[in-house]
Amino acid sequence: MSKTFIIEAVMLAVHGQLMLPGQPVTYIIPYTSIQELYELQTGSEPIMLEEEDDGFVKEMIGELIAFFEESFNKKKIEKALTMPWRKSPPLPINDNVTLEVVFAIDNEAYGEQFDPIETELILTAIKEQAALLTDQLELIERLIEAGIPVQAFDVADFEFAVEDDHQV
């Protein structure tokens, strides 16, 4: 059975190990985080501290964009965009990784404490009853402080999260 995580698209470019899990994983990605990839790719702000790493991550972002723009994948994603909270059909990456894109809507439920993409991640995690996967420790701390009923894992704990039998 596949383990499901809610994640931003850029995490897949920054953290290569997420594409090589030891067992099947499904990543549900809010559509707005895919749109963010275009901004990150063309922006002048570095994503990573080291110039070499930054170039590699921007290359990976380009590959992700190309994947999402492939005709068959694009049609699946467009199908999800016809209605709020609809998910795309599965987009297989490899034998163990499948992506699903959700047309999440920021309803400002957490607007004071979280930015729009964070709010979409939270709402998607609640709706899908799946864990959130992030590399932002301060996001996990804010989730805990706000008492939001979402299980969250740091990317550094990815292997543990995949093996963990406790779904939300």
Image: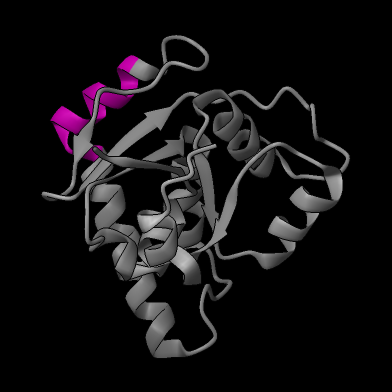
Between 149 and 58, the one nearer to me in the picture = 149
Q: Residue furthest left?
A: 95
| Number of marks in picture | 0
Residue 41, given in percent of the width and then of the height, sits at 43, 61
Between 47 and 7, the one nearer to me in the picture = 7
Residue 158, given in percent of the width and then of the height, sits at 42, 63
**Which portion, as a residue range, is magenta?**
69-79
Between 41 and 156, the one nearer to me in the picture = 156
In this image, 23 relative to 167: left or right?
left
Looking at the rendered image, the quarter that the C terminus falls into is top right
Please give the name of the residue rendered at 54% of the width and 76% of the height, measured from the top-left corner: 46
Q: Is residue 78 above or below residue 134?
A: above
Q: Residue furthest right?
A: 112
Residue 156, given in percent of the width and then of the height, sits at 49, 72
Colouring rule applied to residues: one colour
Residue 83, given in percent of the width and then of the height, sits at 47, 9
Q: Quadrant of residue 91?
A: top left
Please give the name of the residue rendered at 61% of the width and 23% of the height, measured from the top-left corner: 105
Looking at the rendered image, the quarter that the N terminus falls into is top left
The dominant secondary structure in magenta is helix
Does the magenta-highlighted stretch encompass residue 71? yes
Please give the name of the residue rendered at 48% of the width and 68% of the height, measured from the top-left corner: 157
In this image, 16 relative to 45: left or right?
left
Does the magenta-highlighted stretch encompass residue 126? no
Between 54 and 129, the one nearer to me in the picture = 129
Please give the name of the residue rendered at 13% of the width and 50% of the height, measured from the top-left corner: 94
Q: Quadrant of residue 21?
A: bottom left
In this image, 104 relative to 37: left or right?
right
Q: Is residue 69 above or below residue 145?
A: above
